């Protein structure tokens, strides 16, 4: 049940973020002067993110991929809540998908912070959702023996499931804080 709720909440957060970004991207395509509501200042500037090359790395807007991927996560969570049970291969495939997702958002974080030099609040929500879902699913797979990990790692994930996502999100938060320290403190 806890994993089901995590997948439902993170999947829904990801769908929401992807949906808002997709709608704003369509508005931006129709009107190049459109400014998304989340473009608040020179740092929190969703429009700059949407106009970048990185915003369509696979040839179509990234949030369209998010609509599909987060929708799938939401469906898995709802299936678990309804009592579904899945085999090991299914969980490992889900974990591989989440690994791709967390790798992709890590690349997007780097691009946002050090190449585009702007943040998008909706993107940050998608980052957090992806990080939480990846670590919680990895923890679930390790605890249940689906991932071959040492007994110590299995015990760690059983007792401290919250630590890896908290550390990961904290590290990203520190990167954001230090990247624009002068802006935040002025």
Image: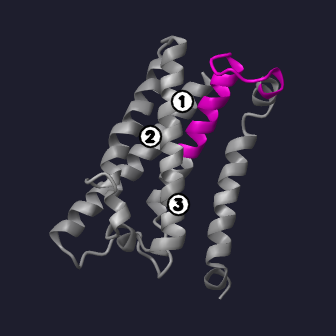
Tag 3 residue? 109
Distance between the Cα atoms at labels 1 and 3? Answer: 20 Å
Marks 1 and 3 in Cβ contact (< 8 Å): no
Percent of width and height locating residue 57: 34, 56
Q: Nearer the viewer, residue 150 or 16?
A: 150
Front tag of 2 and 3: 3
Q: Earlier in the sequence, mark 2 or mark 3?
A: 2
Which quarter of the figure is the C terminus placed in?
Answer: bottom right
First to last magenta residue range: 130-153
Tag 2 residue? 12
Does 121 sit above or below residue 4?
below
Tag 1 residue? 95
Decide whether residue 19 is among the magenta residues.
no
Category of crowding for the residue at label 2, using alpha-carbon neighbours closer than 10 angstroms: few (below 14), some (14–19), many (at least 20) = many
Does 151 sit above or below residue 171?
above
Q: Earlier in the sequence, mark 2 or mark 1?
A: 2
Tell me the residue at 39%/44% (across/down): 15
Q: Is residue 81 visible?
A: no
Percent of width and height locating residue 178: 68, 73
Tell me the residue at 22%/61% (across/down): 26
Front tag of 2 and 1: 1
Tell me the residue at 58%/45% (across/down): 131
Q: Give the SS element for disc 2.
A: helix
Percent of width and height locating residue 36: 33, 70
What secondary structure predominates along the stretch shown in magenta?
helix
Q: Nearer the viewer, residue 144 or 159?
A: 144
Distance between the Cα atoms at labels 2 and 1? Answer: 18 Å
Distance between the Cα atoms at labels 2 and 3? Answer: 21 Å
């Amino acid at each position: 049940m806890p994993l089901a709720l995590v997948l439902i909440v993170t999947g829904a957060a990801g769908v929401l973020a992807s949906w808002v970004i997709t709608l704003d991207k369509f508005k931006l395509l129709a009107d190049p002067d459109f400014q998304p509501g989340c473009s608040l200042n020179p740092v929190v500037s969703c429009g700059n993110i949407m106009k970048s090359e990185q915003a369509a790395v696979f040839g179509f807007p990234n949030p369209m991929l998010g609509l599909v991927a987060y929708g799938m996560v939401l469906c898995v969570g709802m299936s678990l809540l309804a009592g579904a049970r899945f085999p090991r291969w299914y969980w490992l495939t889900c974990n591989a998908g989440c690994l791709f997702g967390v790798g992709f958002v890590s690349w997007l974080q780097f691009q946002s912070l050090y190449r585009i030099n702007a943040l998008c609040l909706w993107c940050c929500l998608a980052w957090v959702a992806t990080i939480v879902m990846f670590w919680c699913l990895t923890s679930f797979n390790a605890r249940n023996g689906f991932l071959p990990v040492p007994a110590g790692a299995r015990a760690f994930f059983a007792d401290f499931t919250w630590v890896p996502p908290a550390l990961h999100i904290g590290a990203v938060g520190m990167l954001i804080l230090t990247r624009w320290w002068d802006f935040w403190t002025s």
